[in-house]
Image (spheres, grey):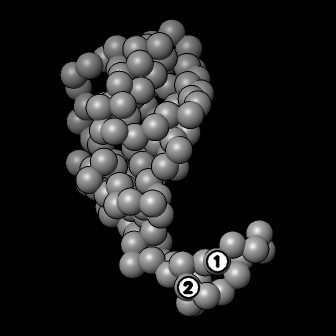
């Protein structure tokens, strides 16, 4: 398994600059955390890799357990026993994943914003 953290750089140069919506932009040390995982050798939990409803429920529970806020989701199966692609939109940003059960492989993409508080631990 390989997880690569990536932090996005703030775009505002100073906390007094105005955004297009008239709000002041604030420079932040770390406005968000982006985790990307390539998960190889996923041999257990075949239902999580092929059953859309089970995988969606599992991800929603993981989001809730982490203290993040789901605001919507969409999961798609590519057929009986085939892979699943799913996303959960978060108030804090998103979780996305793709499964390839034939290759025992899953990709995971989690991004959380940290504008009102540091959500890094929740993402991890």
* Residue, disc 1: 24
Decide which of 55, 119 is in the foreground and name it: 119
Q: Can residue 50 be seen here?
A: no
Number of residues whose C-alpha sits closer than 10 Å to that of mark 1, classed few (under 14), some (14–19) or many (20 or more): some
Residue displayed at 29% across by 32% down:
65
Give me the residue at 53% from left, 44% from top: 91
Rendering coords of residue 6 (x, y %): 38, 67
Residue 48 percent coordinates (x, y): 35, 20
Q: Residue 100: which disc?
A: none
Give how far apart the Cα atoms at labels 2 and 1 are. Answer: 7 Å
Task: Say which residue label 2 marks.
Answer: 15
Question: For residue 79, what is the image quadrant?
Answer: top right
Residue nearest the observer in this picture, 73 or 27: 27
Work out whether residue 48 can be spotted. Answer: yes
Name the N-terminal-most of marks 2 and 1.
2
Eyeballing the image, is 1 above or below 120?
above
Quarter assignment of residue 39 = top left
Which element carries disc 2, helix, strand or loop? Answer: loop
Comparing 104 with 77, the one in front is: 77
What secondary structure is found at the residue carrying circle 1? loop
Q: Measuring 37% from the left and 34% from the top, which residue is drawn there?
A: 63
Picture layout, residue 21 above or below residue 35:
below
Marks 2,1: beta carbons within 8 A = yes
């Amino acid at each position: 398994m390989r997880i690569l953290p990536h932090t996005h750089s703030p775009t505002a140069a100073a906390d007094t600059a105005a955004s297009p919506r008239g709000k002041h932009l604030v420079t932040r040390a770390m406005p968000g955390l982006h985790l990307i995982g390539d998960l190889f050798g996923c041999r257990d939990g075949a239902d999580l890799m092929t059953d859309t409803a089970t995988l969606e429920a599992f991800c929603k529970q993981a989001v809730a357990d982490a203290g993040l806020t789901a605001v919507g989701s969409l999961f798609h199966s590519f057929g009986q026993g085939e892979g699943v692609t799913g996303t959960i939109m978060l108030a804090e940003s998103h979780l996305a994943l793709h499964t390839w059960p034939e290759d025992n492989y899953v990709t995971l993409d989690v991004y959380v914003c940290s504008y009102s508080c540091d959500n890094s631990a929740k993402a991890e």
